[in-house]
């Protein structure tokens, strides 16, 4: 899981970040990948490209168990919780990470002798601790993110972005991007769920949210929520229906909240980008059992997210998303923020899908333009432009190679490159708008520094878009102006492969997984600093 690139280059010219830009978005999401699972590598590769997840936010671990068995609290701590938090601290991300996203291929439920079964989301939220049996089974745990209401008090607290909640090392909200194991979805379906989840961002969709009623206790336990939630949605110009009928063919669906053991999605309408559908049944998130429709069934049908219990939760409404999920969503919160504000006791719940989907947020586009041509020596100047930005104050944060440099409103931005290593670097700009429910937009720009005549040139003779999984890739790395140092290959900023001979370096694509991967060569200088080559974006495909 080592990713040493982030800590070789020093940034002597950086000023202290004046105002952290924490409006929740890709910059604040840690993506956790299981190197023991080829599918985990592949789905993560796609999500990095789909959402622009910063590569320093991608953290690799190795687990020893599959996804269908109960795993102990100790295994979670030893294999996931402790290693991930050590990397967060090592990479100086503690003040930035607000939530985690797990790729596929992780154990999904946890228990020890004498303790209740809780989900991967549950044990991540409690910081690696399984609570007492009574607390979990009775749904007595109250999440610090829950915004109400209860059946005896109909006051919903205002929606908030994650930045406004107290962050600590005690736990993180999280989601699983997909499941490709038993009762899971094929990789193309899992990838398409993530792609589709981005299509509705800012679209203010006109689809309908369906609150489906029945005499089933799975439905009656939360029907008290439907009328109030529907009224709030109407005030937000979002259409909802309370009915005993499921959405028929020909309808446009933005949400389904139901209560049933089995769901027939083939008889329903079209699930729009950003749709969350859930059916409050006992084992929708338990892939070791053959009964009950699984959360993956909703995703295969076209939904962007779903949720289900990993063990028998009983028909207790606090353990499942409330109808007010859609109110938070319609107020502009992301999907994962809406989940956590609407579930009081999420300890046995598995939340799956695209966490950053924001159909009712304002769409913006941020661009960075370099005012320098070619390699830069001395001052590098960049201009940042935002299209579609709302009125009001904004905050801007800048990062070079993932580390904060300055937070300011000044535009254009000037960077003194004389304290950077030669070679290629990445500038990221992140902007924040709004108050309680805030908006984030982000853009990146690669640039080359040449103050000392040092660089690395990388050549690959093959087709970069059709490299087969299992193929050994050979790259020619030519150092220019570099008389010392150690050269390594980096795939998505993780060290891979080895030197074959002279200037030839190689790696097996099984080390990186399928999908889009960013390759670079880097030379660690003896006097300090890291000279990086120009990024080379490849696509690893199925060998069949």
Image (cartoon, rainbow, N blue to C red):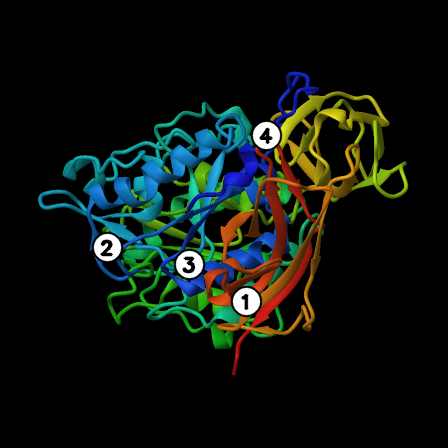
The quarter of the displayed image where residue 129 is located: top left
Query: Which residue is labeled 2 in the image?
Result: 311
Q: CA distance from mark 3 to mark 1?
A: 18 Å
Q: CA distance from mark 2 to mark 1?
A: 25 Å
| Pair 3/1: label in front | 3
Query: Which residue is labeled 1 in the image?
Result: 302
Q: CA distance from mark 4 to mark 2?
A: 52 Å
In the picture, measured across the screen, residue 48 lies left or right of residue 307, that is right
Vertical position of residue 31 compared to residue 178: above or below: above
Residue 528's mark?
4
The quarter of the displayed image where residue 390 is located: top right
Task: Give the mark nearest the N terminus, 4 or 3.
Answer: 3
Question: Residue at left 83%, top 27%?
Answer: 378
The residue nearer to you, when weighing 532 against 80, is: 532
Q: Secondary structure at mark 3?
A: loop
In the picture, measured across the screen, residue 392 lies left or right of residue 315, that is right
């Amino acid at each position: 899981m080592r990713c040493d690139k982030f800590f070789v280059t020093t940034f002597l010219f950086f000023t202290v970040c004046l105002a952290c830009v924490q409006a929740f978005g890709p910059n604040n999401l840690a993506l956790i990948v299981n190197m023991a699972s080829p599918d985990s590598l592949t789905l993560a590769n796609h999500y990095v490209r789909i959402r622009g997840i910063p590569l320093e936010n991608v953290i690799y671990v190795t687990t020893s168990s599959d996804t269908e068995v109960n795993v102990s609290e100790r295994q979670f701590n030893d294999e996931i919780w402790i290693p991930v938090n050590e990397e967060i601290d090592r990479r100086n991300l503690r003040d930035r990470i607000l939530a985690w996203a797990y790729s596929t291929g992780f154990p999904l439920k946890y228990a020890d002798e004498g303790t209740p079964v809780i989900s991967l989301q549950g044990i991540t939220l409690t910081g690696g601790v399984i609570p007492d049996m009574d607390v979990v089974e009775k749904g007595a745990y109250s999440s610090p993110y829950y915004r109400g209401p209860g059946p005896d008090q109909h006051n919903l607290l205002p929606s908030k972005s994650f930045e406004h909640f107290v962050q600590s090392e005690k736990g993180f909200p999280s989601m699983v991007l997909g499941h490709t194991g038993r009762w899971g979805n094929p990789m193309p379906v899992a990838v398409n769920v993530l792609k589709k989840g981005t299509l509705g961002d800012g679209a203010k969709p006109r689809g309908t949210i369906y609150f489906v009623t029945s005499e089933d206790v799975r439905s009656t336990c939360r029907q008290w929520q439907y009328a109030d939630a529907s009224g709030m949605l109407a005030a937000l110009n979002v259409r909802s229906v309370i009915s005993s009928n499921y959405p028929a063919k020909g309808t446009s669906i933005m949400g389904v909240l139901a209560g049933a053991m089995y769901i027939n999605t083939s008889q329903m309408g079209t699930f729009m980008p950003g749709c969350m559908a859930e059916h409050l049944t006992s084992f929708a998130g338990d892939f070791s059992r053959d009964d009950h429709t699984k959360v993956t069934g909703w995703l295969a049908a076209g939904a962007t997210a779903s949720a289900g219990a990993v063990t028998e939760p009983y028909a207790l409404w606090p353990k499942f998303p409330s109808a007010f999920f859609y109110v938070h969503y319609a107020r502009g919160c992301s999907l994962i923020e809406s989940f956590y504000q609407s579930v009081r006791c999420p300890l046995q719940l598995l939340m799956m899908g695209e966490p950053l989907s924001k159909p009712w947020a304002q769409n913006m586009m941020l661009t960075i333009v370099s005012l320098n041509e070619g390699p830069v020596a001395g001052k590098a100047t960049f201009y940042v432009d935002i299209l579609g930005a709302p009125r009001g104050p904004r905050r801007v944060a800048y990062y070079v190679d993932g580390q904060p440099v300055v937070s300011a409103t000044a535009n254009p931005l000037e960077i003194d490159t004389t304290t950077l290593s030669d070679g290629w670097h990445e500038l990221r700009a992140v902007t924040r708008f709004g108050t309680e429910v805030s908006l984030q937009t982000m853009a990146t720009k690669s640039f080359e520094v040449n103050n000392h005549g040092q660089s690395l040139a990388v050549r690959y003779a093959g087709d970069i878009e059709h490299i087969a999984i299992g193929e050994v890739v050979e790259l020619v790395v030519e150092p220019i102006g570099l008389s010392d140092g150690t050269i390594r290959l980096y795939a998505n900023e993780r060290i891979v492969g080895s030197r074959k001979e002279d200037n030839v370096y190689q790696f097996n694509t099984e080390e990186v997984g399928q999908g889009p991967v960013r390759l670079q060569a880097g030379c660690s200088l003896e006097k300090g600093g890291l000279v990086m080559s120009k990024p080379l974006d490849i696509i690893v495909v199925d060998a069949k």
